[in-house]
Each structure stands twice: as structure tokens, then as C-alpha cells.
Image: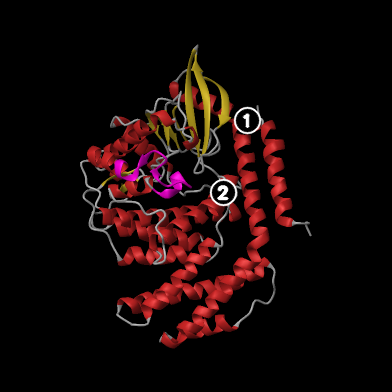
């Protein structure tokens, strides 16, 4: 066991004992690879002979996405309480005395994987339909009724789209280490061609994509993860992000490596009760790539100037950012052959 | 100098995957080694092409500035374009080329915004220049594309 693992084992044992009012043993502490926004660890905790798998998300020294842990935790809580597959939220802790940094704890969802490389071909279509049906169910949620208005900025159906553009254009301007001519051209395009008002305001997951849900070998989804960018907005934002060509690179015939784009949209429309207007969806697809570039630029800036030298930050900033620019040029250049542009339902 | 630099660096990545990855103590370390090997392969590609990529940015932007100059009314932008088109990098180190290319690309971004405004206002010359600027962006992205299995 490393010194860090021992530190967490001890700190979590003290914390859980205090919260559960019973002596709690913590074992099998190990870090889960892939998490870029927070350190993600799993462990086993026991009161007496009863063991329980837990996931601990710890604020990093630096991260790919600057997010508020309360927003993420409350979004998971809202989704879980609404009956969506999400890890059961247990604790949100802001104090530093236990692990040295703030953290949250959820139950572990077992028997699943998240890697897009493991998608079972025999169950690919079932998994795809389930993925976009669940996204449609998220689109049905009223975030204010769920209490999320307390932790998420208010917006309107008219303003939510361009507010998002302003936010991510600001991230790019703040964090870029070199000028971003493609992203800037795309931001100008988004502002010149605003979409129609949202059909409704809903809970937007913010990072709904292959890799951010746990699925079983037979193609069921047991948990939707990574809610740190959740906010109130246009549900088309999630639909567009979920179909970004990055998530099926390099073969972009299937959205998220799962379904033809038209079938993904149809599943979402059926579950959400909303329509995916092709022009509005196109706008959100361009936006998705601008947002992506904002995230990748931030991760690169964190890698170069921040405390963490986690290679996933460099991979996001160097390789993924490069691909995202290829997608944007494909969307917008007058010379494009539109290799990636497939939104027609 | 590293002999056959790009290939030499790529060999290091291969060694990480074949020699170190199988000996990783846990899944997290294995993922880290895989990512590091992938990043080293990107470094190998940039080692070979970085100077050419940046010099071609600088030269292509200068050509656009000369083409656009007769149409630009904004005197400040016009001066920045002329300065960028006339200046040469003071050296060939990548850091120097990067700094020089950054200045040129910043001017090009402002020119592109001005051309779009002129196009939307109906200026007859603007659509062709807008296409030229997009051709620059097409090439800008294409020459930076990495070959990667990730």
C-alpha cells in the first residue's frame, strides 16, 4: 500500500466512523484511472462484517474542468432521487480535516465498465437506445423543481444558448497559450447565427458521452457519471454533445460508437417528448466543439502552469484539442467535405 | 542532437509500451504509462515538423495580409498587417517561431472578423477573402493533425 493509499484508508475510516456513528474499517483503497476533473478512488468499507463498495471523489490540486463540487453532488442527488441510474450519493464534505481536500462519497456500482472499447457488439443497439432514452429522461427533468436552482445559475429559454457561448469563449480567452483562430471563427459564427429559444429549460448533464456511464455486458446502463458540468439550459446541448464525433473517433458513422445518428435522435425525441430541429441541433453541435476546445485548452494550460502534471491533462490538451479543431473546420469551412457533419434525423 | 530524432523518440514510446506497461503495479499506473507513451509519440511527430508548421503559418498569413491590404479601412489593423507581413522571425528556435507565429495569427483573427463584417455588409471583395482565410484555417488544422491510435 502506498503512503497516499494508507493516508486515505485512515482518513476515510475516521470520517465514516464519525458519520455513521459506528467503528468503520476501510480497505482496498485504489485509484481509478481516467478521471480528469477530480481524483477518483474506490474502497471497501465495513461496519462489523458488512462490507460496502464506495467511490470517493477528491478535489484535485488542479483539474481539467474548474467545477463546484456542490453542483456535481446535488445533480447526482437529483438524478438519483428522480429514479435515473446514478450512484447513490452518501456524503459531501467540504472540510479539510479528513482527507486534506474536500470530497464526496457515493456507492460503488459493480459489475459494469465504462470503456468505449468494451462495448459488446451483440448489445450495441440496445445500449445505444438506452443511452439516448436516458438522456431524453434527463431532458424531461425540471431542475428548479428538483431544487437545483439553489446551486445552478438561473437562465432563460432565450438567453441560455449565448450565455454558454460567452462562458466558453471566456474560458478560451483566459486559458489559451497560443491564439485559437479556429475557435474564434466558430465563436463568431455562433454569435451571428443564434438558435431559436429552447423548447424548455431542463437539467443539462454537461458531459453526457460514451465513457461517462457504466454499462453491463448485456447492454444496460446502471449509472450515469461525471455530473460536474451540470447546469440549467437547453436540452439540445446534451444531445449535440453526446453525438460529437470525438466520442466515436475515428469512425464517425455511429454516434458514440453505438447508433446511427438518426436513430439516436429518434430515441431521444421519443423519451424527451421534444423535437430536435436540425438547424438548432447543428448550432448546438458547433457549440459542442467550441466547448470542447475550451475544455482542452484549459487542460493544457493546467498541465503547463498548474500543480498537476497528470498526463491525461496533456493528452486532452494536445491530441483531443487537435481533433476538436478538425471537427470544427469540417463543420464550418466552405471547403469542407463534411466528413463529420451528420445531423439529419 | 538525437540521431533521426522523430524515429528515436518513437522508439522510446514503443519501449514504454512493450517494456514498462506489462510491469505496471496497478491499473492506474498502467493507464499512466499508456498515456505517457501516447504523448511521447506526439512529441516525435512535432519534433520533425514543428519548424515547418510554424514557418508556413507565418508565410501564409503574410501572403493573406498583402492580398487583403487594399480592402482594409481600419488603419490600425492595416498597420499591424503590414508589420506582420514585413517582419521575419529573429531565429529558428521553436520558441522564437512560436512567438512570431502567435503575433501573425492574432492579426489574422482580427482580419477574419473584419472580413466577415464586410461580407455581411455586402462588400463584393469579402467572400473571396473569407474563403482564403478559411483555406488558411483548413491548412492550419491539417498540418497539425497527429497520427495516433488513442
Subunit of label 2: A
Residue B146, image x and y in percent?
57, 54
**Closer to the camera in the image, A284 or A232:** A284
- Residues tagged 1 and 2 counted as in contact (Cβ below 8 A): no
Residue B142, image x and y in percent?
52, 61
Q: Relative to A12, does residue A177 appear above or below in the rendering? A: below
Residue A126 highlighted magenta (yes or no): no
Residue A250 highlighted magenta (yes or no): yes
Q: Is residue A87 visible?
A: no
Subunit of label 1: B
**Closer to the camera in the image, A326 or A237:** A326
Q: Report the residue marked by disc 1.
A: B26
Q: Residue at x 49, y 70 (%)?
A: B136
Q: Report the residue marked by disc 2.
A: A315
Q: Relative to A95, does residue B97 appear above or below in the rendering? A: below
Q: Relative to B9, does residue A220 appear above or below in the rendering? A: above
Which residue ends up furthest to the front in the rendered image? Answer: A337
- Helix, strand or loop at disc 1? loop
Q: Relative to B115, does residue A334 appear above or below in the rendering? A: above
Q: Residue at x 51, y 66 (%)?
A: B139
- Quadrant in which the N terminus of chain A is drawn: top right
The circle on residue A17 is none
Q: Residue at x 66, y 49 (%)?
A: B40
Read off the magenta span. Answer: A244-263
**Closer to the camera in the image, A250 or B27:** A250
Q: Is residue B126 left or right of residue A182?
A: left
Distance from the alpha carbon under mark 1 to that under mark 2: 20 Å
Q: Is residue B70 visible?
A: yes
Amino acid at each position: 500500500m502506498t503512503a497516499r493509499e494508507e493516508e486515505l484508508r485512515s482518513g476515510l475510516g475516521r470520517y465514516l466512523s464519525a458519520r455513521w456513528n459506528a467503528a468503520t474499517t476501510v480497505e482496498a483503497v485504489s485509484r481509478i484511472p481516467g478521471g480528469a476533473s477530480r481524483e477518483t478512488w474506490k474502497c471497501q468499507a465495513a461496519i462489523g462484517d458488512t462490507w460496502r463498495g464506495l467511490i470517493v471523489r477528491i478535489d484535485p490540486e488542479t483539474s481539467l474542468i474548474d467545477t463546484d463540487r456542490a453542483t456535481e453532488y446535488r445533480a447526482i442527488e437529483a438524478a438519483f432521487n428522480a429514479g435515473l441510474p446514478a450512484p447513490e450519493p452518501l456524503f459531501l464534505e467540504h472540510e479539510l480535516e479528513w482527507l486534506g481536500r474536500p470530497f464526496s462519497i457515493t456507492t460503488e456500482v459493480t459489475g459494469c465498465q465504462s470503456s468505449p472499447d468494451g462495448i459488446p457488439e451483440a448489445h450495441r443497439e440496445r445500449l445505444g437506445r438506452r443511452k439516448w432514452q436516458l438522456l431524453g429522461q434527463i431532458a424531461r427533468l425540471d431542475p428548479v423543481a428538483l431544487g437545483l436552482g439553489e446551486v445552478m445559475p438561473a437562465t432563460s429559454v432565450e438567453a441560455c444558448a449565448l450565455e454558454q457561448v460567452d462562458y466558453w469563449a471566456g474560458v478560451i480567452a483566459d486559458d489559451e497559450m497560443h491564439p485559437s483562430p479556429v475557435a474564434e471563427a466558430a465563436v463568431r459564427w455562433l454569435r451571428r447565427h443564434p438558435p431559436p429559444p429552447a423548447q424548455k429549460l431542463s437539467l443539462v448533464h454537461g458531459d453526457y458521452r460514451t465513457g461517462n456511464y457504466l454499462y453491463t455486458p448485456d447492454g444496460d446502463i446502471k449509472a450515469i457519471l461525471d455530473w460536474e458540468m451540470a447546469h440549467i439550459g437547453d436540452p439540445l446541448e446534451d444531445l449535440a454533445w453526446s453525438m460529437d464525433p470525438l466520442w466515436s473517433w475515428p469512425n464517425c458513422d455511429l454516434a458514440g460508437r453505438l447508433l446511427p445518428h438518426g436513430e439516436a435522435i429518434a430515441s431521444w425525441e421519443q423519451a424527451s417528448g421534444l423535437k430536435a430541429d436540425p438547424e438548432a441541433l447543428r448550432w448546438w453541435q458547433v457549440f459542442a466543439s467550441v466547448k470542447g476546445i475550451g475544455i482542452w485548452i484549459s487542460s493544457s494550460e493546467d498541465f503547463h502552469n498548474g500543480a498537476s502534471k497528470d498526463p491525461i491533462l496533456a493528452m486532452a490538451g494536445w491530441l483531443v484539442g487537435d481533433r476538436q479543431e478538425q471537427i470544427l473546420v469540417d463543420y464550418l469551412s466552405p471547403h469542407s467535405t463534411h466528413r463529420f457533419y451528420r445531423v439529419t434525423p | 542532437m538525437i540521431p533521426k530524432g522523430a524515429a528515436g523518440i518513437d522508439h522510446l514510446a514503443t519501449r514504454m509500451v512493450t517494456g514498462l506497461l506489462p510491469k505496471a503495479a496497478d491499473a492506474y499506473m498502467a493507464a499512466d504509462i499508456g498515456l505517457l507513451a501516447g504523448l511521447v509519440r506526439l512529441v516525435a511527430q512535432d519534433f520533425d515538423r514543428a519548424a515547418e508548421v510554424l514557418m508556413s503559418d507565418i508565410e501564409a498569413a503574410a501572403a493573406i495580409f498583402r492580398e487583403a491590404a487594399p480592402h482594409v479601412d481600419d488603419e490600425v489593423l492595416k498597420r499591424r498587417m503590414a508589420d506582420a507581413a514585413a517582419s521575419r522571425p529573429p531565429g529558428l528556435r521553436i520558441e522564437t517561431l512560436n512567438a512570431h507565429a502567435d503575433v501573425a495569427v492574432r492579426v489574422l483573427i482580427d482580419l477574419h472578423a473584419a472580413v466577415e463584417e464586410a461580407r455581411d455588409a455586402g462588400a463584393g471583395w469579402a467572400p473571396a477573402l473569407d474563403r482564403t482565410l478559411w483555406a488558411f484555417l483548413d491548412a492550419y488544422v491539417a498540418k497539425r493533425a497527429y497520427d495516433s491510435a488513442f
